[in-house]
């Protein structure tokens, strides 16, 4: 029997994708945001594709702000862009 791969929805393109293909952004209990490349940090997570188009859509639509119901620091978007450049 084959193991099921967990799927998550990208907040940019709204497509369901394999969790390992996505970048996770986490908000912890102290209301700190960070990019979680391991996918194992504690806190509320949102997932986004490793593509510039999806990040641009997320910024334009304020997807992270809606997901976490609060303001997200610009540094988080910059960290997501850096993570994409490392993956390419």
Image (cartoon, helix red, strand yellow):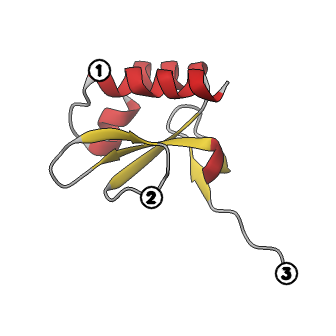
x, y percent for residue 77: 39, 24
23 left or right, relative to 35:
right
x, y percent for residue 66: 32, 38
- Residue at figure coordinates x 75%, y 73% from the top left: 3
Q: How would you rate the neighbour count of disc 2 (Cα within 10 Å): few for under 14, some for 14-19, many for 20 or more?
A: few
25 is higher (above) or lower (below) than 39: above
Q: Secondary structure at mark 1?
A: helix
Residue 74: give its label.
1
Mark 1 touching mark 2, by CB under 8 A? no
Residue highlighted by disc 2: 40
69 is higher (above) or lower (below) than 61: below
Residue highlighted by disc 3: 1
Q: Nearer the viewer, residue 75 or 53?
A: 75
x, y percent for residue 18: 67, 51
Q: Secondary structure at mark 3?
A: loop
Q: Nearer the viewer, residue 1 or 13?
A: 1
- Residue at figure coordinates x 35%, y 46% from the top left: 26
Q: How would you rate the neighbour count of disc 3 (Cα within 10 Å): few for under 14, some for 14-19, many for 20 or more?
A: few
37 left or right, relative to 41:
right
Q: Nearer the viewer, residue 13 or 30?
A: 30
C-alpha gap between disc 1 and disc 2: 23 Å
Q: Secondary structure at mark 2?
A: loop
Mark 3 or mark 1: name the one nearer the start of the chain.
3
């Amino acid at each position: 029997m084959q193991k099921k791969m967990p799927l998550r929805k990208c907040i940019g393109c709204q497509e369901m994708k394999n969790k390992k293909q996505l970048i996770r952004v986490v908000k912890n209990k102290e209301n700190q945001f960070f990019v979680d490349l391991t996918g194992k940090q504690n806190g509320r997570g949102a997932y986004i594709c490793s593509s510039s188009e999806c990040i641009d859509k997320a910024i334009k639509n304020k997807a992270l702000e809606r997901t976490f119901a609060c303001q997200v620091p610009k540094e988080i978007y910059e960290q997501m862009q850096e993570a994409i450049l490392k993956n390419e």
